[in-house]
Amino acid sequence: MGEVKERILGLRKERLERLATLNPETKLTLSLLRRSPLAVIGISMVTIFASIALLGPYLAPYDPYQLDLSVRFSPPSAGHWFGTDGEGRDIFSRVVFGSRYSLVAGLVPVISAVILGVILGAIAGFKGGKIEDLLMRITDMFLAFPSTILAMAIAAGLGPSLENAMIAMIAVWWPSYARLVRGSVLSIKETEYVEAARATGETDINLIFRYVLPNALSPIIVMATLDIGGAILTAAGLSFIGLGAQPPTPEWGAMVNAARIYAIEYWWLPTFPGLAILAVVLGFNLFGDGLRDALDPRLRRF
Amino acid sequence: MGGEDLLEVSNLETHFFSYRGVVKAVDGVFFDMKKGESLGLVGETGSGKSVTALSIMRLVPPPGKIVGGEVIFQGENLLEKSEEEMRRIRGKRISMIFQDPMTSLNPVFRVGEQLAEVFIQHQKLDKKEAEKKSVDLLRSVGIPDPDRRAKQFPHQLSGGMRQRAMIAMALASRPDLLIADEPTTALDVTIQAQILELIKELRREVGTSMLLITHNLGVVAETCDRIAIMYAGGIIELAKAVNLFKNPLHPYTQGLLDCIPRIDAPKKRLAVISGLVPDLIQPPPGCRFHPRCESASDRCRTEKPYLIDIGGGHWVACGRNAEDAGKP
Amino acid sequence: MAIVLLGISVITFVLARYVPGDPVLHYLGERARDETIQRLRERWGLDRPVWEQYVIFIKGLLQGDLGTSISTQHPVTSDLAEFFPFTIELATSALLVSVVVGVPLGVISAVKRNKTIDHASRIFALAGSSTPIFWLAIMTIYLFYFRLGWVPGAGVISSHVQRPATITGLYTIDSLITGNFPAFLSTLHHLILPSLVLGSYSTALTTRIVRSSMLEILGQDYVRTARAKGLPERIVIYKHALKNTLIATVTIIGLNYGGLLSGAVITETVFARPGLGTYSIGTMLALDYPAIVGVTLVATIVYACINLVVDLLYGFLDPRIRYG
């Protein structure tokens, strides 16, 4: 009996040691990231955009909603760097303000989908049995749809607005994360140190947080960073169709939509908002790529 | 045995340029082989034996690079040859078989076809002839029903059969030198013996010399004429098999032999060589083994020992042995 | 599988009806008389409880009837039969583009790793997967149609060309079958730019995946064996490595197609092409329930079929599965 207790105490110490070893892992990841030029460029771009979004009001020379019909359709000039649109609004200011919507539209749905997916996936993987089956059926159903079409349908059903577009995206994206987490949970569940922890009477929730999640974390993070770019594109796309942000909101996709009919005569109308989308998504993609390379165990040897 | 020189490796250096530093996997390797003999290259994982073999074939993967030395094969320095010239040598005059036959065969092509490639490439046979010869070859390595097997895919064969097929592929062109990198490690023990026997037989038939790489002293005892012990990127002892087992000179070799449990000896605790394999990015100064050596002297800590001929073809790289033999 | 389909139909159905708007009012306008509203409600079956509507829907579905579109007043099935082929034509040609461009680019990129061409193609792939399709469409129309006049800016076929007889609904195939070459050429001409634009994202994706798959395979033991046999490098790459890569790439095609169907919606809108895209946007904004349900169902079924085909193809190509 005393032997068993000793063993269990030994295992407890092992747990603590294992938690401590997480840090060298993270340190290695960070140093690899620093070395990857792509990731560095990516995160700088993201930081720049985040700053633009935060400092919007201070950076924009004009009020994005302010009409000035006397200068409508002016090409780019010293006074209006990106020109003006059909209502005389300064496009540069609108692009600056639009960064907020895009960043929010990128981050909120992904983070929410991750949280939702991780919780559901972890529960399903952990409990197994009927709950797991039910989750698998539900995710099967959701994943059977081509994702953007489903997002469109949901957004249409809820009514066109940026918030509803984000809800639609959360609904479409959470199943992938749920599946990912469930897979990780299944493989980790069987490992010995989880069994040992169970033997010491750990509660299920504790087990999930201390063991399962840290190990499942890296693929989730990679998938999420790459999805942020996709989310921004999807949100802009939905707005472009008319199912997302509505005019006169200075959201980039909506701006391109409004500019569409004038594109031939006034090239600057759709060009700059679109370039902005390109730049932000590029930044996130670069960072996501760098992150994925840094976290890839095979590439880590050299 | 005697006979002409086949292979002479001098001061071979192969380094891997990684993020964490330069890994000196092969750092000054010397050995030679005569025609018809078999040399066993023995060492732990990470000692550099596989990299040595790959260096001879010039198949070192990036970020590895051969940075120095000479590999004289039948009078020609392989390190100076062009890639095109090397291609004519590989598979024809020097062949290699690898450790894991499952991953070493292409899973999406039939076994017979993979064998036929060698004939088509080096003997310029046409497809039909090559395929026929492949079947014959499969038969000669002891695979039953070779016609059927040749049309199958690697995953349909057992581990032992796959390795036989690999051996067939390597010996198809009757090469002068066969390099076998841990050919039996991935196989069941019972199959191991069969494979070794097969290699012995074929060597006799074709007259191929063999460089056998392994960590298993038992295997080399059976199959090799001479043995070279490798440690941390260098050869530390080289002798005829008989002499090595009878009179191991280097402390590391002695340690290795001590580690082998013996049925006929009284039961005692298993011996180990204390310490860890050195870091190849920053190896210890002087003799690389000195941190783990019981008889290390100050000289060992500062001077790197070279291979010295103690006599009778027995070479050792050890400061203490050099002193004992009265050599500088 | 059946349960999944059932679930899908439920979701789609509920989705379409969970709207804050009333399609009848939307259709008739705010000032319609109560009588008319009521009559139309009855006609469209909207006055029944939801579950009853669902049952009617399923009954109709099993008979191949998807109801009548509120916007077009045609049976949804005939609407779909008319519009869907255009979308398939566009998505498939975009897929062809992504395979024809993406695979070789990915292979070369992997083989000449870290050389100029690799960096160039990686930048291209990165840019391609970051570019919003609708914007790319507008920009390229401006450049290649308006400025350079190389391609038409809208439509599926030139107005002065005789349309091919409807056999499959796909203009390319139909015009070839009926020997209507002007129609064939015109259709292709109208397909070029939209396919390239729609295909940009999936080409980028394909390039990246082929590249990483190829890199992984080039590090495999059997490639080392092939080299050790003295085989020329070009055989090592194009025979031994490539076949393994292709097998892995096939799975990407299935995933790609779903994205292409979705992207087609946007592309059709910008290029003013008829197809599922324009149809679905119109019906969604008009709260046209039967049409919305029909579109989503059909799109999903097509996606499922493509994935099924891909799975079968994969099983066929990989000898480990085929000869078990």
Image (cartoon, grey):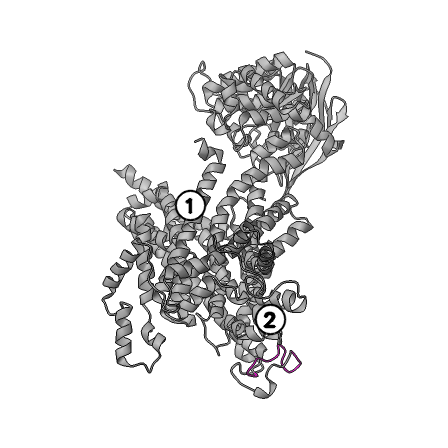
Q: Quadrant of residue A62?
A: bottom right
In which chain is the residue bearing label 1? Answer: C
Residue that sits furthest to the bottom in the current view: A70
Residue A282 placement (x, y as % from top left)? 57, 61
User: In this figure, which residue is indicated by the disc labeled 2?
Assistant: A271
Magenta residues: mostly which secondary structure?
A: loop
Q: Nearer the viewer, residue B75 or B82?
A: B82
User: In this figure, which residue is indicated by the disc labeled 1?
Assistant: C308
In which chain is the residue bearing label 2? Answer: A
- Does C201 sit left or right of B262 as displayed? right
Is residue C117 positioned above or below A152 on the image? above
Q: Secondary structure at mark 2?
A: helix
Q: Secondary structure at mark 1?
A: helix
Q: How much space separates mark 1 and mark 2, taking CA atoms?
A: 40 Å
Q: Are marks 1 and 2 on the same chain?
A: no
Q: Is residue A84 magenta?
A: yes
